[in-house]
C-alpha cells in the first residue's frame, strides 16, 4: 500500500529549490512504498503569514489518507501555526518538523508568524510530533528547539551534532522514523 507524505518547504528568497534536494534525498532513503508530494508554496509579502496558512490547508486537503507531513524551517513553524489555530478536519497521522524556528521579537514582519502563547494546548492531540535539529544549523539557532521541548514535552526530539540546516547525512534517521510509525 502506498504511503503518502506532504513535504512543506522552508522559506527564504528561494526556499523551494534548495529544499528539493532535501526531498529527493529523503525519497531515496524511503522505499518505493512512499510517495512525497512537494508543492511549491508562494509567499505573499502583503499577508501577515505570507499566505502560507491557506496554502498549507489546501495541500493537506489534497492529500490521500493516511498521510504524514514533513516540514522544514519556516514551513515547520507555519505548520504548527496552522494546526494550532484552525479546526483541522483532515489531520496527518504524524508530523516531522525539521529545523523549526520559534518566532519572537517585535518586528512587524514577524507578527504573523508567531505562535499563540497557548499553541501547544491547541495542537491536535492524536497526532505525534517529531522535532529534528542540528547543532551547527546556520539558519535557525539550535537553542530554539529547547522552546519546543518545554512547550510540547510529549513530542519526540532528535538532535544532531552536525548536518547544518539541510540535515546532511541524517535523512536516513528521519526516513527510518517515518517508516517505523
Image: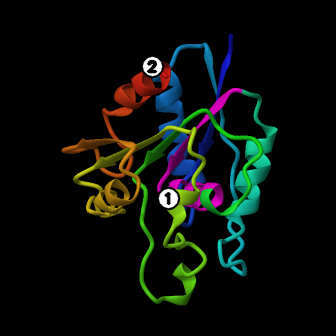
Kind of element beneath mark 2? loop
Position in image of residue 171 (x %, y %): 39, 32
- Residue denoted by label 2: 180
Marks 1 and 2, how far apart at CA: 24 Å
Q: Is residue 74 among what the camera can see?
A: no
Position in image of residue 79 (x %, y %): 59, 54
Quarter the N terminus occupies: top right
Q: Is residue 172 above or below residue 138?
A: above
Position in image of residue 60 (x %, y %): 73, 44
Q: Is residue 35 left or right of residue 77?
A: right
Mark 1 residue crowding within 10 angstroms, few (<14) / some (14–19) / many (20+): some
Q: Compare residues 79 and 51 and report the one nearer the observer.
A: 79
Q: Compare residues 94 and 22 and report the one nearer the observer.
A: 94
Kind of element beneath mark 1? helix
- Residue denoted by label 1: 120
Residues rendered magenta in the picture:
66-83
Q: Residue at x 45, y 19 (%)?
A: 180
Amino acid at each position: 500500500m502506498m504511503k503518502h507524505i506532504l513535504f512543506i518547504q522552508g522559506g527564504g528568497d528561494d526556499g523551494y529549490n534548495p529544499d528539493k534536494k532535501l526531498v529527493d534525498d529523503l525519497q531515496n532513503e524511503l522505499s518505493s512504498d512512499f510517495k512525497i508530494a512537494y508543492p511549491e508554496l508562494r509567499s505573499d509579502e502583503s499577508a501577515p503569514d505570507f499566505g502560507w496558512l491557506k496554502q498549507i490547508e489546501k495541500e493537506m486537503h489534497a492529500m490521500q489518507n493516511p498521510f504524514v507531513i514533513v516540514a522544514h524551517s519556516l514551513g515547520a513553524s507555519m505548520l504548527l501555526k496552522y494546526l494550532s489555530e484552525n479546526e483541522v478536519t483532515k489531520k496527518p497521522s504524524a508530523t516531522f518538523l525539521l529545523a523549526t524556528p520559534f518566532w519572537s521579537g517585535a518586528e512587524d514582519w514577524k507578527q504573523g508568524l508567531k505562535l499563540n502563547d497557548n499553541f501547544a494546548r491547541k495542537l491536535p492531540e492524536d497526532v505525534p510530533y517529531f522535532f529534528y535539529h542540528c547543532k551547527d544549523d546556520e539558519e535557525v539557532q539550535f537553542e530554539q528547539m529547547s522552546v519546543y521541548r518545554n512547550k510540547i514535552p510529549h513530542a519526540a526530539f532528535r538532535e544532531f551534532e552536525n548536518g547544518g540546516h539541510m540535515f546532511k547525512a541524517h535523512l536516513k534517521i528521519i526516513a527510518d522514523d517515518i517508516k517505523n510509525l
